[in-house]
Amino acid sequence: MPLYPHARPFGRVPLAGALALTATLSLAQPASAHTEIEADTPTALARDVTLTFTYEAESDTAGFTQVRVVLPDGIEPDDVTLEHAPRGWKFTAAPDGYTIVGPALATGADAEHAISVRRLPNAEEIVFRTVDTYADGKVARWVELPTQEAESDQPAPVLKLKPADEGAKPADSPSARKADAASADLASGASADTSALAENEGLPAQLTTAGAAAVLVALGAVAWRLKRRRAGGGGAR
């Protein structure tokens, strides 16, 4: 007869509770970011910065064929150039970012590419939403932003930046660059107009000189004719 007949078997309830708790935590654990981003100069307003993106393969049946990146505010597609990408992949700019497309990578192989950015914005962190496409048509969208309330299931890669160096100037906006280009065009047009005007300004004076010469020639011809008539008239008398 057991010493404590009403005692429950040791360890069954605690073990079952632990398993249930583990399962609950596993279900509640948010998905980790499957796209990582690194910068050689992670500083606000830094110039000519190289950003490297690494995409973790998730499919067991197909490899990557395309990566789509949406640029954050403060970085324009014209500010980006491709440094390197998987062999055979092509870079194409888009209104809000860029796309890299190419032959399918091996199944399970991670994808990586790097871009050069003319200048980083003045921010504490910047977000690059990405969309990955596999050869079998599967699409993974890492576009969600974490909130204070909860982590997102498909978080977009975030690059945290150090404060700008002392003396660094704010990045010029696209509108400012367009204004500068327009000003340059206007200045060029004004210069051409000024040159044309300078050439035309001498035209009235040239016309005046030519007109005066023509008048003198005409007067000379009249005087010569009158002289001949007078000479002829004197001989008849």
Image (spheres, helix red, strand yellow):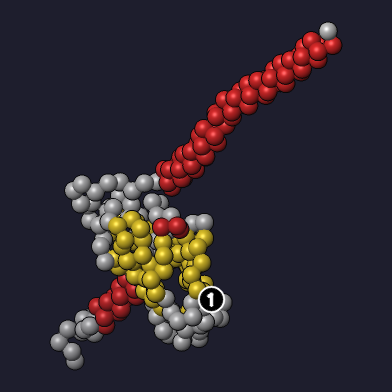
Instruction: Give the residue number, with chain letter if any, for mark 1.
Output: 138
Q: How many marks?
A: 1
| 23, above or below 97, in the image | below
Task: State the image quarter where residue 83 is shown.
Answer: bottom left
Q: Is residue 181 visible?
A: yes
Which amino acid type is shown beneath numbered disc 1?
Lys
Observer able to see residue 144: no
Which residue occupies the foreground of this view, 225 or 53? 225
Q: Identify the residue at the far bottom of this view.
A: 1
Residue lying farthest to the left in this orientation: 3
- In-front residue for pair 43/7: 43
Q: In the depicted view, which residue is nearer to us: 12 or 198?
A: 198
Residue at 61% x, 23% y is 208
| Image quadrant where one finds the N terminus | bottom left
Give me the residue at 32% from left, 55% from top.
Answer: 120
User: Which image quarter is the C terminus in?
Assistant: top right
Q: Along the horizontal axis of the image, is 116 left or right of 190?
A: left
- The x, y position of residue 20, in whole percent, is 33, 75
Query: Residue lying farthest top?
Result: 237
Question: Does 185 appear above or below 70?
Answer: above
- Helix, strand or loop under label 1: loop
Q: Is residue 99 left or right of residue 159?
A: right
Specify few, some or many for label 1: CA neighbours under 10 Å numbering under 14, 14-19, or 20 or more. some
Spot occupied by residue 89 in the image (x, y as percentages of width and height): 48, 77
What's the residue at 30%, 78% (across, down)? Answer: 19
Q: Nearer the viewer, residue 201 or 237?
A: 237
Q: Is residue 35 above or below residue 147?
A: below
From the top left corner, tell me how far across and down residue 62 is, in percent: 50, 84
* Residue at image point 30% right, 73% down: 21
Q: Is residue 229 left or right of residue 189?
A: right
Q: Answer with left or right where residue 129 lies relative to residue 215.
A: left
